[in-house]
Image: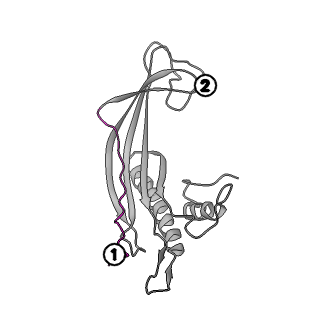
Amino acid sequence: EIVTQPGQQQYFVAVAVLTGGACAGSSTAGSTGAVSAQLVSSGFEPYADTIMGRGLLWVHARLTSTASASSSTTASSASFSSSSSSASPAVRVKDVIFTTTHLESFMRNYPSPGSTYDGVAERSNQLRQAVRFCTDYATERARHGTRIDAAFITGDLNWDDERKRSSGNDRRMLDVVASASSGSGGAGRSS
């Protein structure tokens, strides 16, 4: 059962991927080229622990960049820029998972007047499930010969519903991500 409060609007998430065309791009080394995206797969992964119908919307996209013939050949080029001879354009392909989510929200007067549903445990579990989904998806694709080069979890994480705003990294959230991805070679954290 999905729970809503009186007068509450439903929330949705969306991912948009520009396909079928190429966007002009440039690297940090100053070379230029074109970047295009191909939609490989997409879906919605519902969270196991939600009373609000929340889940992870995901897209597997294949990004292709073609560096122009005049691009730089330096080793400091960005990951999509050419590092080969300038005689012909270099093509780089990266498979990426883009996700968005709206984690469980704080709810006053639930399950009864005067009570509070804070969703803290659910948000932590949902974030772990999102990381696990990305890791499992990347592992499965690798079995079929496709390397996932990066995965991004974005959206409304509701991480500060009941906390004071911080002036730096949220160590508690970084610990959740690090613990969910430990040993996977996937996400991590930096100091």
Label for residue 75?
A: 2
Residue at 54%, 58% in the rendered image: 184
Q: Tell me if label 1 and label 2 are in contact, CB under 8 Å.
A: no
Please, is residue 93 above or below residue 45 in the view?
A: above
| Mark 1 closeness class: few <14, some 14–19, many ≥20 residues within 10 Å | few
Q: Where is residue 109 in the image (x, y as percent from the top left)?
A: 46, 82
- What kind of element bears circle 1? loop
Q: Position of residue 175 (x, y in %)?
A: 63, 63
Residue at 38%, 72% in the rendered image: 52
For the residue marked with disc 1, what is the amino acid?
Ile
Please, is residue 28 above or below residue 126 in the view?
A: above
Q: Relative to 39, is 25 on the left or the right?
A: right
Label for residue 2?
A: 1
Question: Reading the chain from its start, which is encountered first: label 1 or label 2?
Answer: 1
In the image, the segment drawn in magenta is 1-20
Q: Relative to 82, is 17 on the left or the right?
A: left
Q: Position of residue 8 (x, y in %)?
A: 36, 70
- What kind of element bears circle 2? loop
Q: Relative to 142, is 74 on the left or the right?
A: right
